[in-house]
Image: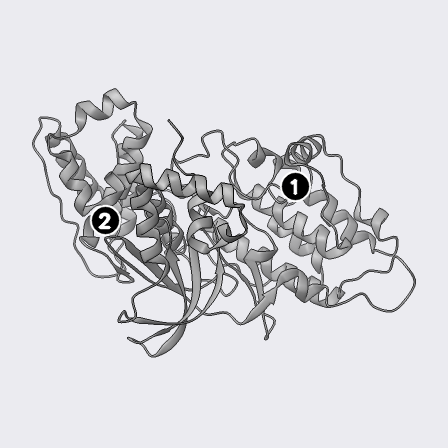
Amino acid sequence: MEECLSDNQIAALVSGHAAGASSDDLSRLEAHLDGCPRCLTIVAAALRAEAPAADSRFAIVRRLGSGGMGTVYEALDRAHNTRVALKVLRHVAPDTILRFKREFRALSGVRHPNLVRRGELLGDDDRWCFTMELLDGVRFLDFVRPGAPAGAPGAPGFDDARLRDAFRQLVHGLAALHADGKVHRDVKPSNVLVTAQGRVVLIDLGLVLDQRGDSESSGGNALGTVAYMAPEQALGKRVGPEADLYAAGVLLYQALTGELPFAGDPLAIVERKQRGELVEPRLCVPALAAPWNELCVALLHPAPGARPTVAEILRALDASAPPAPIALPCAPAPEAALPFIGRADQLHALRRALDDTRGGQPVVALVAGDAGLGKTALVQWFAAGCRERGAVVLAGRCDARESLPFKAIDGIVDALSRYLARLPAIEVAAVLPRDAALLARTFPVLA
């Protein structure tokens, strides 16, 4: 039996990229769709999602771009009478819905001028989309390399002042994301824009990893763009902030030299990165200032622990200028080094409620109080203790920026879906209720 269509094939069909395919390839795709109801249903749903309804809340102005998971439009939001960037999920399936929501929620705990501002998430049946601020800007490399200046051959083709300021802003944006426990995992030129006012904005968090509450790893598969991913990321390992700084180093290398540091087929690139076979930027641009060369080489070190920290990068960029403030997460992780003081009675009550559930009796605990009293910190600390005792903790939050069915528990259901996906099939079958299939009608991520 012929294999079902891949995500890339479906994306090509929907976005129109298949128009350049040969007639034989198109015939095979059409024949497969004729004989495969599953793929036909997926493609039909994707086509409906690709073209938002004319009577919807959003009036499409123009198409801005398309990726493997969704298409981004400039749109008029009739509800607020403002222009927004509207990202529409193209291939609607349980795993893509999870990733789509993960991307939107990645910035729920942090707000920073160098990170794209999120708007609203809307989802129902086979239509999923979210809004973001509409950015009128150019790609990072186009901004810092406006053209090679006149002079001797080998002279730098970048604007030093622009690069210094833009790279500093990029590092601050990454630092804010990392302070919130997130790793971007796909830093590359197309995901870093610079506005006409010189504001650098990191966009597209489709591959973001939440280090504090997300047990997802790449499962042995390299997620990201090979040319920019760190050596450890290319091996499919779980990565940390150092991987984003490596990708920023690749971006810096391109800005300095106009070339990628590693060329060739993907396997050759990965092998050279592992061995640290780097042609230093100064060998490509003899007139390059030594500090630029040293910073770039340090960022591209194959060992994560050997790469410079954010503070070291900022000092290297401009030791004389005071660093701009770095955004901190709205709520610190309960696992942080700072001790949790007080609330002993409340913690005891929560732990007693947990013990009561061990007899099979469900318990609902309401944590109430005025804003700013530490309710979130209390619950996070309690949940961390539950994990240490071997309990399965499924967490979510009700966000005013989300318009979803049953949104009060939507995040918990997503967490349940990810948890079940990690279990062996025989264990999943043992815990699912008899009518589990009915739940998937309300919560597609459980399908």
Residue 437 x, y percent position in the rendering: 16, 36
Q: Nearer the viewer, residue 9 or 349?
A: 9
Disc assigned to residue 410: 2
Left or right position of 369 against 258: left
Answer yes or no: is residue 210 visible. Answer: no
In 3D space, how far apart are the residues under numbered discs 2 and 1 (Cα atoms)? 39 Å
Residue at 27% x, 58% y: name it.
399
* Residue farthest right in this picture: 152
- Name the residue nearer the viewer: 318 or 38: 38
Relative placement, left or right, of 225 versus 11 is: right
Residue 59 lies left or right of residue 314; in this view the side is left
Identity, as a three-letter code, of the amino acid under mark 1: Arg
Position of residue 391 measured from the top left corner of the image (x, y, whole percent): 25, 30
Indicate whether 160 appears above or below 262. below
Q: Residue at x 74, y 51 (%)?
A: 259
Q: What x and y, as percent, mark residue 78?
A: 31, 76
